[in-house]
Image (cartoon, rainbow, N blue to C red):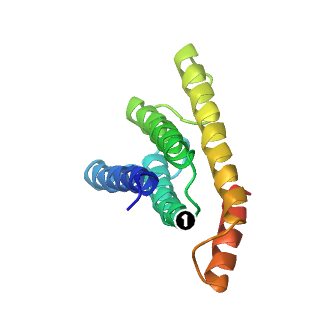
């Protein structure tokens, strides 16, 4: 496995572990799965982001090697882990993670989340564009990968 794939896979694994951990916390503590303060957010963001990162690890292995691969994977992994970590932090604080400007701390957390979402989106955009180059897969798998990347970007 290449270094960029390893970075993305480890990122995905850590996020999946975080999602399963938060499912366990919810099962133990109870509480709603709806509303701005609920265990749904850390569960959903951890699991969805984990699957996304692992999917990108697969795609990274099919892309041509460039000198930017490892750097992009590292930037993506750090940004995604930090973003989801901030969402989890807000749940543990008992504060909404999105659209929350009730205190200066919450405003700063929201600003960081927005900035990190932008970074993650830019890396996904780069990988989407690169997926339209040569892929080391069959034509039908290339079509599926490219379509999936476009949908993810949207």
Q: Position of residue 137 (x, y in %)?
A: 58, 78
Q: Residue at x 29, y 49 (%)?
A: 25
Q: Which residue is mark 1?
A: 59
Residue 151, given in percent of the width and then of the height, sits at 71, 64
Name the residue: 59% across, 35% down: 116
Q: Is residue 59 visible?
A: yes
Quarter of the figure with residue 63: bottom right
Q: Image point 62% across, 26% down: which residue?
A: 111
Place of residue 28 in the rendered image (x, y in percent of width and height, measured from the top left): 25, 52
Of 1 and 45, the residue lying toward us: 1
Q: Secondary structure at mark 1?
A: helix
- Vertical order, 99 against 138 (above or below): above
Marks counted in the figure total 1
Q: Is residue 46 left or right of residue 99?
A: left
| Residue 132 location (% of width, % of height) | 72, 66
Is the residue marked by circle 1 packed among few (<14), some (14-19), or many (20+) residues within 10 Å? many
Closer to us: 10 or 92: 10
């Amino acid at each position: 496995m290449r270094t960029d794939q390893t970075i993305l896979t480890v990122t995905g694994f850590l996020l999946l572990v975080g999602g399963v951990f938060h499912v366990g916390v919810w099962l133990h503590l109870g509480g709603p799965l709806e509303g701005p303060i609920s265990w749904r957010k850390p569960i959903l963001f951890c699991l969805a982001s984990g699957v996304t990162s692992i999917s990108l690890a697969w795609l990274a292995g099919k892309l041509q090697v460039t000198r930017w691969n490892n750097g992009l994977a590292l930037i993506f992994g750090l940004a995604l882990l930090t973003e989801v970590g901030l969402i989890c932090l807000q749940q543990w604080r008992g504060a909404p993670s999105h659209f929350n400007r009730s205190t200066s701390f919450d405003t700063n957390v929201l600003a960081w989340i927005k900035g990190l979402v932008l970074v993650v989106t830019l890396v996904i955009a780069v990988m989407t564009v690169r997926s339209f180059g040569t892929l080391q897969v069959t034509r039908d798998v290339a079509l599926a990968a490219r379509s999936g990347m476009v949908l993810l970007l949207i």
